[in-house]
Image (cartoon, rainbow, N blue to C red):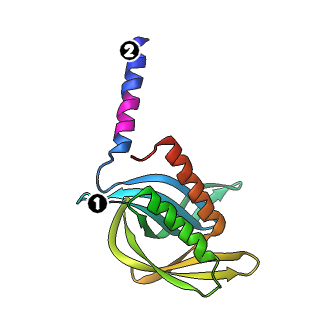
Amino acid sequence: MKKVLFALSLTLITAISFAQNFPAGMRNEITSIEQDDEQYTLFSYKDEDGTFGYYLGLGHVIPLLEIAKDDVAFASLSHQDETCIFLGSTVEEVYASLDGFLELLENAPGTTKEFPCRLSSGAERLGGSGTAACMVVKRFLQGKRLSFLFKSGNRTAQADLTKSGIKSLRWSMDIEQKLRPQK
């Protein structure tokens, strides 16, 4: 029994140590939420040169094929366009960026702003830098939201971020900080 407890505690210590010092070129996901066909992921990322940052992955999922039987999906094939908005290199900058999104939503529809971003190059890695254009829009019977336009390959993709989505991401960041406070 002592050997089992020792092995479990050693595994836990190793996992916690690995989570704190994750390797370069990998996403360390903090939280992920989905609304309609939109997926939002808050994660940290370390580049090969050692630079560290927090990003908000905005993805729009396009279902191409789904095989279902009795209202249960057996298999699906889909395509996801994703851009990753840079939120900052510290936790305080992340909070300031998320609060900035909420402040931007207070503006009139049609207000635009550009944000630095990086495109997802697949396999959980980030590609080159770019910009994502953001516009405050008001959808019929849905309220205001931030609509991000970005290049994905040879075409332009769009992902919308709602006020409830921003608040959910901020709340998840609060929980993350309580579980694993940054130094």
Give the labeled residue for mark 1: 51
- Find out whether residue 81 is within the magenta segment: no
Q: Position of residue 177 (x, y in %)?
A: 50, 47
Which residue appears at 41% of the width and 12% of the height?
A: 2
14 in the magenta segment: yes
Which element is circle 2 on?
helix
Q: Residue at x 60, y 70 (%)?
A: 102
Drawn side of residue 97 relative to residue 11, left or right = right
Left or right, 22 with respect to 172, comes to left
Q: Mark 2 points at which residue?
A: 3
Q: Outermost residue toward the right? A: 141
Residue 110 position in % (x across, y down): 61, 88
Answer few, some or many: residues within 10 Å of disc 2's Cα (few below 14, many 20 plus, some between 14 and 19). few
Residue 58 or residue 66, whichever sits in front:
58
The answer, for residue 151, to whether it is visible in the render is no
- Picture quadrant where residue 139 is located: bottom right
Q: Which residue is drawn at 48% across and 52% down?
A: 30
Q: Tell whether 103 sits left or right of 156.
A: right
Query: In front: mark 1 or mark 2?
Result: 1
- Residue at image x 51%, y 61%? 95
Marks 1 and 2, how far apart in space? 40 Å
Image quadrant containing the N terminus: top left
Q: Is mark 1 on a helix, strand or loop?
A: loop
Which residue range is magenta in the image?
A: 11-17
Name the amino acid type tagged 1. Thr
- Looking at the picture, tell me which residue is in the foreground, 159 or 164: 164
- Residue extending furthest left? 49
Residue 87 seen by the camera: yes
On the image, the x and y values in percent for residue 53 come to 37, 60
Q: Earlier in the sequence, mark 1 or mark 2?
A: 2
